[in-house]
Amino acid sequence: MTLSTLERPKTVPREEWLAAREELLRVEKKFTRLRDELSRQRRELPRVRVTKDYRFATAAGERTLADLFAGRRQLAVYHFMFGPDWEEGCKSCSLLADHVDGAAVHLAHRDVTLLAVSRAPLEKIEAFKRRMGWRFPWVSSHGSDFNFDFHVSFTAEQMAAGRVYYNYEMQELGNDEAPGVSVFARERSGDVYHTYSSYARGLDLLVGAYNYLDLVPKGRDEDDLPYTMAWVRHHDRYEL
């Protein structure tokens, strides 16, 4: 019989546990320093000026990419999987979105606007947003090249070819929509620059629930699932 994750660790006296914990703390501190260095290198990436005139449908009317900054100098865009013909947004993206409202107000006071973008028409986005009880800005790129240019949406021709360019490599993808985050900076001149994009496991840091699961004995507990995040539901669809 296979032991559950909760039954695997041995039980030891408190003093032995403390010694093991202090050793792990040294590894955790090393990881923290490595993460700080990674963040420094991320900030020093070169940037690309955005010259295409992207237009978005918002609750306040049509807006440009520069308008989405809402007067701030930094913009973080979450590419929320919600295709034009979908009836609701992606479950996994919804898990991430459940963490956004609490962070957005703080980010606004650090010169950062945080919002979501999807290809679904604005009416569908607004209806789903009301259902989920979210307040963060969420705009539609329907009819725009934005999602395609940032490699989170794929044409029928691209999908038919069998492999698409996602997460900086050609790969098979089972869906014509994929998640990601893109970051932009706006100069006082009004020029907008693309500074960073991340996809797939690079989004883990944005999912607070996963960070909590990484602390508990069973961890993410996904090894026996048919696919990662198969357990996730929209927060109004979990069975009590």
Image (tube, rainbow, N blue to C red):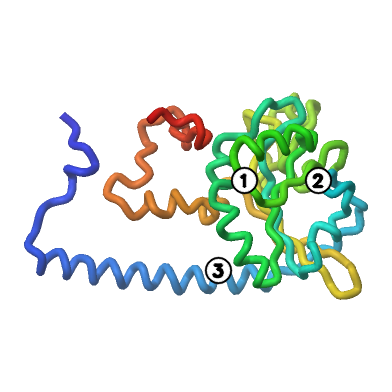
Residue 18 is situated, as x and y percent measured from the top left of the image, at 17, 68
Disc sitting over residue 59 in the figure:
2
Q: Are marks 3 and 1 in contact (CB under 8 Å)?
A: no
Residues at discs 3 and 2 in contact (Cβ within 8 Å): no
Does residue 73 appear to the left or right of 211 in the view shown?
Answer: right
Looking at the image, residue 63 sits to the left or right of residue 10; the answer is right
Find residue 29 and report its horizontal and vertical position in percent.
Answer: 37, 72
Asked whether residue 208 appears in the rendered view, the answer is yes
Q: Is residue 139 left or right of residue 223?
A: right
- Could you classify mark 2 by the number of other residues whose Cα lies within 10 Å: few (under 14), some (14-19), or many (20 or more)? some
Residue topped by disc 1: 134
Is residue 202 in sight in this rendering? Answer: no
Q: Secondary structure at mark 1?
A: loop
Q: Residue 215: image x %, image y %?
A: 34, 55
112 and 170: which is toward the camera: 112
Residue bearing mark 3: 38
Asked where in the image residue 151 lies, by quadrant, the reply is top right
Q: Amino acid at mark 1?
A: Trp
